Image (tube, helix red, strand yellow):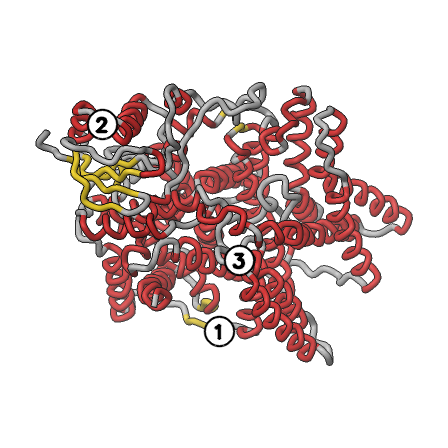
Amino acid sequence: MDYLRVAIVIAPQFLAGCLIYLLVLKRSEVDVIELVSIGSVFGIVSSTIIDQIFVNLQLPHIGWQVAVFLAVVSFLQVKRSKKFVLPRVSLGSDFKKSVFAITAISATALGTEWFWLFPSGVLLVIASSFLIAPPKKYSRIASGIASVFAAIAGIFMIASRPKIWWFMYEHDFPFFQALSRSLSDWGLRDYVLLSGTTTKYHWFTYAWIGLIDRASGAQVFFVLTKVAPAIFVLLITAVSWSFIKQFSKSTFKTYIGTLLVMTASTYPLWGYGVKISFLASPSQFFATSIFFVAIHLLTLMSNNLLRLQVATISIFAASTMLSKTMHGVVLISALAFAFLGQFVTKTKISKKIAASGFLAILIALLTYFLLVSNSEGENVLQIRFGDFFWQLQGDARLLPEKYVDLFGLLTIVSFSVLPILLITLRLLLLKKFSLNQMDFLSIGGLVSGALLSVLILSAYGENLYFLQAATSLSILLSFSSLSQISISPINLKWRIVIAIVGIIFCSISFLIPSIDSGAQDAIIIRSLRVYTPAVLIISFSLIIIVLGIFRREDRFNQVFRVTAVAAVMSISFSAANWFNAIERKHNEFARDGETYLANKNLTDVTDWMNSNSANSDIVASNFGWPRMLPGDAEHFRSPCTSFRNKEVSIETCRRTSNALLVAYMHRRTWLQTTALHYTGFTPEIDRRQTVTLGFAADPTSAHLQQMVEDGVDWFVVDRLTTSRATWEPYATIEYTNDSFFVLRLNKHK
C-alpha cells in the first residue's frame, strides 16, 4: 500500500510539472521523454517551494495541492485563450528503444550503490546496446538473451541480498529521515534536533521527501531510501538523454553519452568513486536532477526558447543551491565563466539574457547566505591546498607538506581526466567551430570544481563534492558538443585495443599493493593507486601521438582514441568498485545488526509518543549518549580538531550521532545528535547537554526549570544508560518498556 499511496501523491505533482514546462517552452514540438523527465523536476521544484511557503507561514499543509491546482488552471486558461501555441508532444524516433536504454542505464547507475541491482543493470545495458547500435542479423536475439539473463540475475540477487540493502551509512540516514519530516512539519522555523533554532542546511530535496512522507503516510525510511533514489536516478538519466539528444547526430551517440554521464567513476579513494550516484550523500545525488535541468534551461534561454526566463532560471539556480551547496556554487561559477568568456571573445549576447544570468547568480548567492550558511560550515571550510588527501588516506598526514600538496593535486587531475580529454577534443575543433555557451559552461564548471576541491579543506574530504558536480556537468556538456559532429567510426581492431587498454588501466590501480607499515615509502606506493590512471592515460597519449606523427594521422583522431580509452577505464571503475565492495555490503547487516533500524522497543516507544503527544510538543532524551562516568561529560565539550588538523591523530572530542529516535518519533527534540547540528557547538548546546545528562541520572529542580522554560513537555529515558527508576516529583512515568521510560514533565514544580 505504501507504493500506491506514494504514487497517488507524486503523480499529480509530476503531471503539474509537465504542464508548467509546456507553458514556459517556446518550441513547436517537444519529445515525450524530455517532457516527462524535465517536467517531473519542475513538479518537484514547484511543489516543494509552495509547500514550504505554506508550512513556514503556519498555513494548512496543502501547499503541494495548491501547486498542482495552479499549474492545471494556468495551463487550461492559456489553452482556452490561445495566447500562444503550446508545443506538440511527440513520441520521437525509437521511443521504445530509448525507454529501454534509459531504464538499463538507470539500473546500472543505481546498482553501483544498490549493489544487488548492478548485475541486472549491466546485462540490460548489454541488451539495449544490441538494439541501439547499428542493426545486425543477430541483434534482437542477442538482446533477448541478455534480457533473460538480466531477469535471472535480478531474481538471484534479490533473493540473496541482505535484509537492509539500501543503507550506506547508518548514522547519516536517520538524520536525513528526521530532517525530512521536520521540514515537512515545521519548515525552516524550527530544527528537529535542536528545538527553538532555525534549520540551516542544503535542505531542498529533503523537504520534498518529507512532503511525500507526510502526505502519503508511508512507513519511516520508505521514501528516503527506496522511492527517492529510484525516481531521481531515472530523472537524471532521462534528463541527460534528452539534453544530449538535442545535439546528437544519432541515437547511439545519445546512448553512449548518457551511459558515460551516469556510470563514469574513479578509483575509490572516496566512497565508491567520484560519480553521480553516491547515496552516502542523498542531497548530492538528488540535487543533480535540478542541477542538470538548470543547465538545460540556460541552453534554452540562450536560443530564445524559454518564456518567463528571468523567473524560471532564477528559481532553478536558487533550488540548485538549496539542494546541494556545492552544486549551486559550481552552477553559478560556470555561469559567470560563460558570461566572462563570451564577453572576452566578443560573442554576441543579448542584454536580456545577460541580465537573466546575473540575476540568477545574485539570487542563488542570496539564497545561500539567507537560508543555508551556518557557523558550522564557516568553521569547517578552510583554504588549505591539497590537504584533503590525508583525510582520505589517513597516514598520509605523516608525509611532508609538499608531498601532500602534490598528491592532492594529482588526485584532482586523475579524477578529472575524462572531462579534460573531452574538452580537449572540443578545443581541437576550434579551427572549424567557435566556442559556444555550452563549451564555456563546461570549462568554467570543471575549472571551478577542480580549484575548489583542491583548495578547500573540509571534514571527511567533502570538498570533493565540488568535483563530483563539475565532472558530471562537464561530461554532459562536452559530449553534447562533440555529438553534433560526424566522427569516423573506429575500426574493429582499434575498438578491441581501446577496450582492453581501458580495462587494464583500471585494473593496474587495484594491483598496486596496499602497504600499511606507516613508512614514508609505503604511503607513497599506496598513494600511487589514486593517480596512476592519469599517469597511464598521459603515457598512452604520448604513444598515440608519436605513432600518429609517423602515420600522419589527424590530431583529433589521436586524442579521440585516448578519450575512448579514458571512457572505458571510467566505466570499468564502476564495475571494479562494485566487485570489490559487494561482499562487504552483503555482510553489512550481519556486521552492524540493529544499528541500521529501530528495534521493537524503540518503535514501540516512538509509536506511543506519536499517538499520545501533540505534534507541537517538544521532547528531551538521553538516547544516543553512553552511560556517563564522572568527568566523561567534558569529552563531549572538547573542540573537534582531528579531521581538520593533520598534526592531531586521535579524536579529541566525542559527539552523539544516533538520530534513530528522532527519525521514528515525529516530534521536535530539545537536544539530539550533537554531531549533526550544523550550528557549531555553542554554549546553548552545552547547557542543554548538561541538563539532559543530569536529569536522566540525577534530576534536580534546576534541570526541570530549564527544560520547562524552553517548552519541553516530555523526557524519553534510555534505560540502558541510567539505573534510575523514578523521577518524582519532577516527572511522571507515562509509558515504559524494557528499554525506555517516557516521562511527562511536572511543569507546576
Residue located at (56% from left, 40% from top): 467
Residue type, label 3: Pro
Q: Name the residue under label 3.
A: 162
Q: Which residue is drawn at 53% across and 73% down?
A: 95
Which is nearer the eye, 86 or 489?
A: 489
Q: Earlier in the sequence, mark 3 or mark 2?
A: 3
Few, some or many C-alpha atoms within 10 Å of disc 3 (few <14, some 14-19, many ≥20)?
some
| Mark toward the viewer: 3 or 2 | 2
Q: Earlier in the sequence, mark 1 or mark 2?
A: 1
Q: Which numbered tag is attached to residue 699? A: 2
Q: Quadrant of residue 191?
A: top left
Q: Dot 2: within a 10 Å radius of its alpha carbon, few (fewer than 14), some, or many (20 or more) residues? A: many
Q: Label 3, label 1: how many angstroms apart (C-alpha)?
A: 40 Å
First in sequence, mark 3 or 1: give its number: 1
**Image quadrant where one finds the N terminus:** bottom left
Q: Which amino acid does label 2 sit on?
A: Pro
Return the residue at label 1.
91
Decide which of 378, 662 is in the foreground and name it: 662
Q: Is residue 532 left or right of residue 253?
A: right
User: How far apart are the two marked residues, 3 and 2, measured between alpha carbons?
Assistant: 43 Å
The correct choice, above or below, for 573 with respect to 202 in the image is: below
In the picture, measured across the screen, residue 536 lies left or right of residue 599, that is right
- 292 or 581: nearer the eye? 581
Question: As displayed, is residue 669 above or below residue 137?
Answer: above
